[in-house]
Image (cartoon, rainbow, N blue to C red):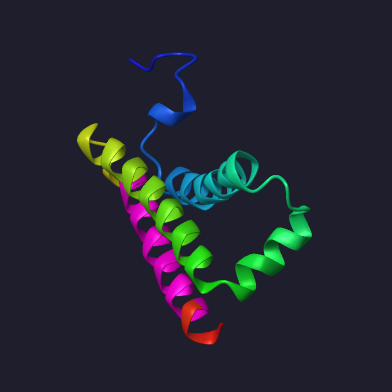
Amino acid sequence: MKKTGTFFLAKDKLPLGIILALLVPFAVFLFIYFLRFSYYDFTEFLGVVKTESRLLTFLAAWCLVANIGLFTIYINSGKYQTAKGVFGITVFYGIVFLLLKMIL
């Protein structure tokens, strides 16, 4: 019997994992900006991130750690389809960050 009104994060769907894994790093990025770097204007902060490779590494690491935590939550709760989506996007982000480090 299907429960009505189930919380959407409790569902086991691949698109949910993809969407969450795309949004969580942006939320972490903004959280770190407001917590530690809010004295910069946001566009100025993006310029600093572009010029300071150590800062890019710091931000990338925390964004990936957030996704790894999300992945762990879904694996431990048996939501394997959602975990697949989170894992795929996390790998994608990792590759993008490595390429950014090589380019910048």
The extreme bottom residue here reads 103
Query: What residue appears at the point 40 percent right and 67 percent down from the top-left corner?
Result: 94
Majority secondary structure in the magenta region: helix
Tell me the quarter of the image containing the C terminus: bottom right
State left or right for residue 58 relative to residue 103.
left
Left or right, 46 with respect to 4, comes to: right
Q: Tally the marks.
A: 0
Seen from the viewer's position, the closer of residues 35 and 90 is 35
Q: Is residue 66 left or right of residue 27?
A: left
Q: Residue furthest front?
A: 39
The spot of residue 57 in percent (x, y) is 45, 66
What percent of the width, then of the height, locates residue 75?
Answer: 24, 41
- Expressed as whole percent of the image width and height from the top left, the position of residue 19 reads 52, 48
Is 63 drawn above or below residue 94 in the view shown? above
Q: Is residue 32 magenta?
A: no
Q: Nearer the viewer, residue 71 or 2?
A: 71
Q: Is residue 98 magenta?
A: yes
Up/down of 10 relative to 15, above or below:
above
Quadrant location of the N terminus in the rendered image: top left
The relative height of residue 7 versus residue 83 in the rendered view (above or below) is above
Percent of width and height locating residue 14: 41, 48
* Residue at position x 51%, y 50% in the image: 25
In the image, 16 versus 54, the foreground residue is 54
Magenta segment, which residues?
81-100
Q: Relative to residue 41, is residue 16 drawn left or right?
A: left
Please report the residue visible at 52 percent of the width from the left and 64 percent of the height from the top: 55
Residue drawn at x 50%, y 45% as measured from the top left: 24
